[in-house]
Structure formats: C-alpha cells, structure tokens
Image (cartoon, rainbow, N blue to C red):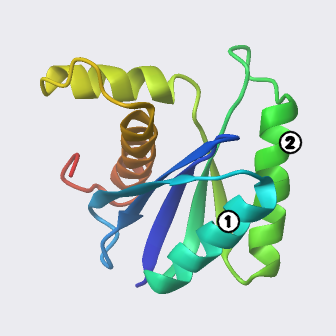
Amino acid sequence: MSRILAVDWGSRRVGLALSDPSRLLARPLPTLLIKSAREAKEKIVEVARGEEADTVLLGLPLHMGGEEGSSARRVRKLGESLCTEGFQVLYVDERMSSEEAMDWLRERGERRPEKARIDQVAALLLLQGYLDAEGGGPGHA
C-alpha cells in the first residue's frame, strides 16, 4: 500500500499529515505557507509525490448545518485538480477540526500554539480518524 496525505486547507496555511505505508498511523508534516490556490496545489503535489502518497484526503469545510459554502467549493476545485495529477482524492468533514486540534494540544500542555501548529494537528487528527475508521488503527500518532 502507499501512503495517504491529509490536507487541512486554508487560504494562507495548509496543514499536512501523512500515513505510514500500512495506513495505520498518521504523522504530522510541516504546515505550508501559501499565497494562492495554485501555489497550494503545486506544493501539495510536490509533497505527495515526494512522500509516495497516491491518495489525498481533503478536509471539507462545511457549515455547521452541513451545507457547502465558498470554502468547500474551493476545496472541491483543488480536489478536481489533484485528480488530474493522478491522485485518488477523498473528502472528510472537517467541521470543528481546528477546535479539536486546540483541545488536543491543550491536553498535551501547549497553551498558546501557533496557528501553523493548529493546522498541522488538525490534518493529523483528520487523517488518524479516517485511518481508524477504515482500518482500525491504534490511535493518534
């Protein structure tokens, strides 16, 4: 099996996490700082290829009622462009992912984490949750 790259997309920062080859454990990767959607796509493709990921898991920012807004449409557009690059693209609901990341970091003693760290952990939690649901992984990396 190859790896899965998880993406917590934002207009300025993109949190990333990567699965191990067995797709049981997730580990965080450095957060990308971006200036445009095109730059985000290019950097995500570069990381995915460099890490031998064939699947990209995109966090889909839904409204609290479950509807898709402009941010979700941008993520879907990113997903479409990643498909044309040969990646399998999966979407996962990322509502409350930043809040969950903050809680996770506070539980570990990080009282005022940087925004890039929150995005990184959000991607980690999205990916580990997906891996646990799909394959029964042992928990957070």
Residue at (80, 62) in percent of width and height: 38
| Residues marked 2 and 1 touching at CB (< 8 Å) | no
Q: Earlier in the sequence, mark 2 or mark 1?
A: 2
Camera sees residue 52? no
Where does residue 66 sit, x and y in percent of width and height? 73, 22
Q: Find residue 117 and name its label.
A: none
Residue with the most extreme top position:
65
Q: CA distance from mark 2 to mark 1?
A: 15 Å
Neighbour tally class for label 1: few under 14, some 14-19, many 20 plus, Cα within 10 Å: many
Residue at image point 30% right, 72% down: 20
Query: Which element type, helix, strand or loop, lies under badge 1?
Result: strand
Q: Residue furthest left?
A: 109
| Callout 2: SS | helix
Q: Position of residue 90 (x, y in %)?
A: 64, 59
The residue wearing badge 1 is 89
Residue 139: tell me if it is visible.
yes
Look at the image and tell me in which quarter the N terminus lies. bottom left
x and y, in percent, of residue 135 in the image: 35, 61
Asked where in the image residue 57 lies, by quadrant, the reply is bottom right
Depicted 111 relative to depicted 39: above or below: above
Which labelled disc corresponds to residue 73? 2
For residue 81, side relative to residue 115 (left or right): right
**Amino acid type, label 1:** Val
Q: Residue at x 40, y 34 (%)?
A: 118
Q: Is residue 103 above or below residue 89?
A: above
Q: Position of residue 89 (x, y in %)?
A: 67, 65
Image quadrant where residue 23 sits: bottom left
